[in-house]
Structure formats: structure tokens, C-alpha cells
Image: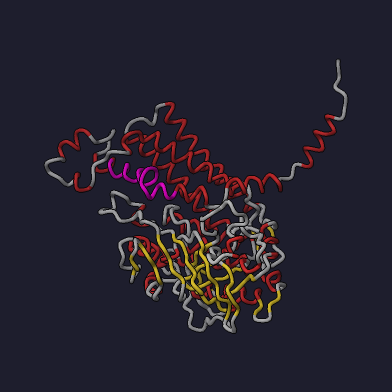
Amino acid sequence: MVLDISTAHGAMTGKRYLQSLNDGREVWLDGQRVPDVTQHPAFTGVVHELARIYDLQHSDQYRDRMTFVSSETGNPCSMSWLLPRSIDDLKRKRANSELWNRECWGQFGRSPDILAPYIITLYDAREALSSMKHPKCDFGENAVNYYRYCAENDLFLTHALGDPQVDRSEQPQNEQRLALEEELALHVVEETNEGVIVSGGKQLATAAPISNECYVSLSATFVRRADPRMVLAFYIPTNSPGMKILCREPASQYPDGYGHPLAMRYDEQDAMLFFDHVLVPWDRLFMLYDASPQLQRLGAGINFIGWANLCRVHQRMRLLTAVATLIAEAIGVIEYREVSAKLGEMATYCEVWRHAMDGIEYNSFMTPGGLMSLGDQAGMNMYFSQTSARMVQLLREICGAGLIMQPSENDLASPELRPYLERYMRGKGVDVDYKSRLYRLANDLAVSSFGMRQEVYEYWHAGDPNRNRINLMRTFNQQDITERIKALLAQPLSHS
């Protein structure tokens, strides 16, 4: 069966997106099933913010920057789905990613722009995927058809790559448990005429409750499996029967927007996925029982993921630096040598990241699949996991104790309190309203439950930092200089 695009409308609108979420999905939060994520206070802020950005794709101001015309249907499709075939295409995708992340202040780790490149990666690997033979389907053909389906419908995707964090003393994770009644890692239960039946758990599916579909596969940590039943990759609709979505405690349920301006809009939710005999149709499978194509891609240096995430990181860096600068001005410490040096350090991280982005664009190359890839970003995969925590700490140090105590909006509106607030809680040349709201923004970045969630997310976003460092060390080419050092050491030292 080929996924149908005959009724596709192209680039998503806000209205279409909100309507797409009412599909019977099984979302659980705090022990209760959520009947409608568009109406629940834990999700209303983020889904309406996404709807707002989706509508920009159809605005006169941004239509040309955010969409392209499909050669197959004539639909205006999101630039996130453009297959890059030239340097100019990469630049167009960068401009789109910069706009997405400017609009959300770099706070969406799983924006629609982030996951589209995963499907482009599958499309590029179509020949390698087709080399894995199965009598029921062609995995490469599935990747091509799924790309067309997503691009023409502008689906919002997320992914779940990790195993349940139950007993990680067993490596590979949980494989020995498959011999027991309790089967934890996602695995194939049986094959049917319609597809494969899968059971098990997957984490961490950020944005799963508010996305259209989920890519389920193996992370780099778990890609080498001894049991072939645990080697599979597929995309599945969020409302698939038998799939439960368990959400964490929300960070977004606050009484006012000024108190937590980021949390109320960008708490994209994280979730565990529980699969209880879920049917995955044959046309939605991209890998089964054999991980060799994925292992091949991991070592190829191909990078379609770049812009969406790199632009997000850059915007987050700039936001942290700008808020710290405004705080320093608001309390009159920006000229202090120590404070200026900290702000300079934050600016350094922003500039290094910008130069690195330019570098991977400069080193772009054509893949065997016929698409332009950005240059390798192996060193960047762990750089921000290290520098993000440092930037947040610098923001805390510049803010001082003001991060802990600021008046609320109700405090500001109180006639009885107002004289005291204006006298004791104003800043240097700024009134108490501005200063308190600025500090609340800083609180959301550096202290609140939302801010702490963001920081944990950044640390693990690219996977295990130690694994990434080890992999970089193993592939880092030092042959030229090590040979020169060995030649230097082979000569006797002069005594003169």
C-alpha cells in the first residue's frame, strides 16, 4: 500500500494542526487520560504557539522564506521538507530554520523543523535500505513514499530512540530479559499479513502528545543488537491502537504569562511510549532484523540534521547572553570588570557557534544519494552539552539573589504594595515592572522547573556525551602530526 497524498494540502496551518490533534490518541497525565490535548492547560500554550508559527508559513511576509512549491502536486510545502540538491538549497533551509527558532527563542527541542531532516536522511539512504530484503516490503521504497506523504501533509514528527531505564547493568540493554516473561525493550512479537506486531517501551519521546507521528528506532547506543527481534525502525501515527503516551509533570501550569513567559509557551512535554501489541503496517517499516544500513550512515558523516538544531542552539545561546546583558544593565553592574568578563565569555560561545555553523556549510558535500549534506559536526555534538550549563551558571551569577525573589503581577497591581515595590525593587533607570519581568524571564531560563528541564535536555540532546567524545577520539584524524612527532623523536637530540 502506498501512502495517499491525493488529498494533501501542503504546508500546515494553525487550524489544521489543532484539528489534527483530536484523533483519539491515548495520552496520560498524572494518572488521568487527557481527552483533548488542545484544551488541557498543560498543552494549550505550546500547541497554540506552534499553530501561530505554522500560520507564518502562509503569511505574505514569510511565505517565500518558509515554503517551496511541490513539483509533484503544486502544493506549497514547508521548507523543512525541501530535498537539498545545491548549496543554495542549504542556505534556504538555514533561513527557514533561523526563522523557526527566532520565533520560539530556541526553546523547541522537537519543533516540526527538527524531525523533518530525519526523513530526508532515510530518503537519501533509500538504496541502502532497499538492499535489506524482505518478501513483504521494500524498505527503500517505503522511505521514499513516506517522505512524499510527510512533505505533502507537513506532518509534525517526533522520535523515540532509547530503551526503558530499568536495569542498565545489562548490556545491551534488557536483551537477557527477553528470555523472561517481562519483555521490556521494544521488539517484534510476530509478523502478520498487515505488518509486524510490536510490544515494549520506548523513551524519550519529547513532544509525542502534541505531534502527528513518531519515529521509533534504535539510538547509536543500542544499534548493535544480538537479538534481531529488537532491530527495527518505523514511523507510526500518534493515535495507533495499543500505544499509550505517559507524560511527565508539566512545567507550564502557571497563573500568569509574565511569571513564566517561556514555560507557558514552550513546555513541549516529554513522554514514555508503551506499546502493547501494536500493529506497524509493512509500508511504515524502514528497517527490520538488520541494522547494517543505520551503522553505515552513522559512520558516513552525512548531516541533514544540522540547521534545525544548530540554529536552535545559536538562538538559545543568544537569548541567554542578551538576558544576562539586560540584567547587568538593569542593576547597574555592567561596567564591573568581573561582570563584563562573564558577558564576554557568553558572547564568545555565541561567536564560536556561529563560526562553526559557517564552517559546516562551507564543508558541505554531495552524498551518494544525490542530496547536499552539511559538513560533519561531530565536535559540535558535545560542545553545547558542555557550554550550555556554563552559560546558565554565568546567568545565575550575574543575576545574583534577585533570581529568587521578585514581585508577581498581582503584587505589581496591588495599590497597597506598589509604593514599596517602586521604592525597593526598581532597577537602575528602569521601573519595577520592567525589572521584575526581566528577572522572571531569567528565572525561566536558569531556575524554574522549565529551565532545569531544558538544561537536562541540552546535556543529553545529542546522546551520551562520553560516548560522543570517545567516538570523536576514535575517528579524529591525527596521522599527519603523529607521524611528524615520531620522526622528530627518532632523531638524537643535539648537545650543541
Q: Which residues are magenta?
A: 436-454
For the N terminus, which image quadrant?
bottom right
Find out whether residue 233 is within the magenta segment.
no
Query: Measuring 51% from the left and 60% from the top, which residue is drawn there?
Result: 114
Q: Position of residue 487 (x, y in %)?
A: 85, 33
With 353 as the anchor, is 443 left or right in this view?
left
On the image, the x and y values in percent for residue 454 come to 44, 50
Front residue of 373/121: it is 121
Question: Is there any visible trace of residue 13 in the rendered image?
Answer: yes
Q: Nearer the viewer, residue 467 or 333?
A: 467
Residue drawn at the location 71% of the way across and 48% of the way down: 475
> Residue 296 vs residue 396: left or right?
right
Q: Residue at x 39, y 45 (%)?
A: 445
Q: Against 117, is 436 above or below?
A: above
Q: Residue at x 68, y 68 (%)?
A: 290
Q: In the visual, does 437 lie left or right of 149?
A: left
Residue 144 is situated, as x and y percent measured from the top left of the image, at 62, 74
Q: Nearer the viewer, residue 154 or 452?
A: 452
Left-right relation of 302 to 62:
right
